[in-house]
Image: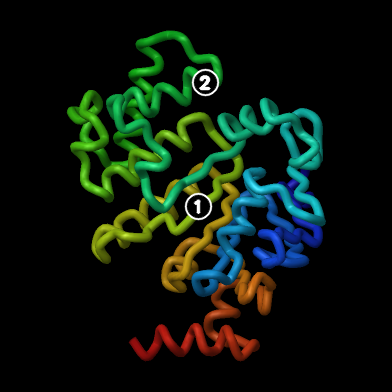
Amino acid sequence: MSDDAPLLRADDVTVLYGARVGCRDVSLDLYPGEVLGVVGESGSGKTTLLNALSGRLEPASGRVVYATRHEGPKDVFALTEPERRFLMRTDWALVHQNPRDGLRMGVSAGANIGERLMGVGWRHYGNIRGTALSWLDKVEIEAGRVDDLPATFSGGMQQRLQIARNLVTGPRLVFMDEPTGGLDVSVQARLLDLLRGLVADLNLSAVVVTHDLAVARVLSHRLMVMRDGGVVEQGLTDQVLDDPQHPYTQLLVSSILQV
């Protein structure tokens, strides 16, 4: 696939919850190696959009198209459920706000990483364990914790383990839902630095949903501002945050500056 073609495209995506609008008429293109930040208050539609883009919530109208490795652009919701699950195990990854939602809490740290490898066909125990150890090192977890349960880890360590579990199979596209939410400021800073480095080193594309404009500035190349289910402003991240044009974006930025 050419880098000139979008990896992910949304065309006029609208999601309804009965009579209530989750998001409406959202269109976007995401290119290889690009990180898109989606910001807005609670209830703005950003998580609904993320769920639609990641194939977990079918839109009432519009479509989501992903450029698959071997068959080119495919409508995500025209895929079968097994095809979507396989995509999520291989080409896609999802980083939850609460790492417990993305980890198997009853198995060891190494097994959490190894399970994803086994899901794509790895069978050699030595290779699986060696790769798990390598990824623990990448996310700054001591090798000696490989056999420990995630429940014995701090929240920041659990989030780093979830990231290792997600990235070990070499996905091209990562969906992140408030990846630093609920963490202390110092832990957030360390995690953001790690995420930024991994995204760059692995040439990942990502959609990052956050209410934290500082997180969006650090991680994203482009920014989309949502309110009441619609997009009110979008552009290069620094441009949007340094010179916001829409009154709502101006309010968001000014509220951060006043804290």
Q: What kind of residue is marked 1? A: Met
Which quadrant of the figure has residue 180?
bottom left
Mark 2 crowdedness (10 Å alpha carbons): few <14, some 14-19, many ≥20:
few
Q: Secondary structure at mark 1?
A: strand
Q: Give residue 157's position: percent from left, percent from top.
A: 27, 44
Q: Give residue 199's position: percent from left, percent from top.
A: 49, 49
Residue found at x 80% / y 58%: 11
Classify the position of the C terminus by image quarter.
Answer: bottom left
Q: Secondary structure at mark 2?
A: helix
Which quadrant of the figure has residue 111?
top left
On screen, 62 above or below 252?
Answer: above
Q: Please give the label number shown on residue 73.
A: none
Residue found at x 34% / y 29%: 134
Q: Please give the label number shown on residue 119.
A: 2
Q: Give residue 168's position: percent from left, percent from top.
A: 46, 31
On screen, 184 above or below 83?
Answer: below
Residue found at x 38% / y 40%: 162
Direction from residue 125 to residue 40 in the image, left or right: right
Q: Please give the label number shown on residue 176.
A: 1
On screen, 167 above or below 124?
Answer: below
Residue found at x 20% / y 30%: 145
Mark 1 crowdedness (10 Å alpha carbons): few <14, some 14-19, many ≥20:
many
